[in-house]
Amino acid sequence: MTARDVAAPWILRPIRVADDAAVARTIHEVMTEFGCSGQGFAIHDAEVAAMSANYPGGRARYYVVERGGEVLGGAGFAPLAGTTPEQATCELRKMYFRPEARGHGLGHALLDLLLAEMRAAGFRRCYLETTSWMTAAQHLYVAHGFEPLAAAEGATGHHACDRHYARAL
């Protein structure tokens, strides 16, 4: 354990413009680490370069995980593309953590926060996409009540994702 581990608490907070570069770097590094850098993965989404502008609050929110002033991960949600407002379905988006942020219960804490925020934003259902080789992520989602789906929903453009989940809010 280092002095940083003792002195600096983990903070979950809404994204700021100043976080954009760190969030983009995290998304690129983690997706590359897990072999998700080809076409059909979120690494190519235009919003990655300016996440704060694409998640301004309301029905599109993104939170970061920070420690000692360094952004080490994050996740957000927005309406699921290709669905209607009446369907009240959001998508859990871009939940990634750098290696040093893993194993501290931050995924559970952030997902709990996001699920509450989704309900507060008026959504009644949450959808997500991942890959079969991101097993820790799948365990996290199932532990939070997500159930596997037979096929993709919406119009995310992430055709390379081979696992789809949803849960009621």
Image (cartoon, rainbow, N blue to C red):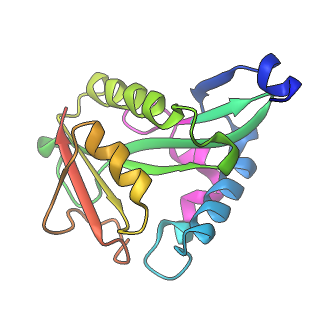
- Residue 100 as seen in the image, left or right of residue 91: right
The number of numbered badges drawn on the structure is 0
Residue, far bottom: 39
Q: Position of residue 63 (x, y in %)?
A: 54, 34
Residue, far right: 3
- Residue 66 as seen in the image, left or right of residue 134: right
Q: Position of residue 168 (x, y in %)?
A: 15, 37
Reply yes or no: does residue 58 show up in magenta: yes
Residue 65 appears in view: yes
Reply yes or no: does residue 72 show up in magenta: no
Residue at x 19% of width, y 31% of height:
169
Q: Position of residue 125 (x, y in %)?
A: 18, 40
- Residue 164 as seen in the image, left or right of residue 106: left
Q: Say above or below: 152 vs 100.
A: below
Q: Position of residue 94 (x, y in %)?
A: 48, 52
Residue at x 42% of width, y 39% of height:
60
Q: Quadrant of the N terminus?
A: top right
Q: Which residues are magenta?
A: 46-63
83 or 7: nearer the viewer: 7
Residue 62 appears in view: no
61 or 167: nearer the viewer: 167
Residue at x 66% of width, y 50% of height:
99
Residue, far front: 1
Q: Say above or below: 35 vs 154.
A: below
Q: Say above or below: 117 vs 99.
A: above
120 or 128: nearer the viewer: 128
Residue at x 38% of width, y 77% of height:
160
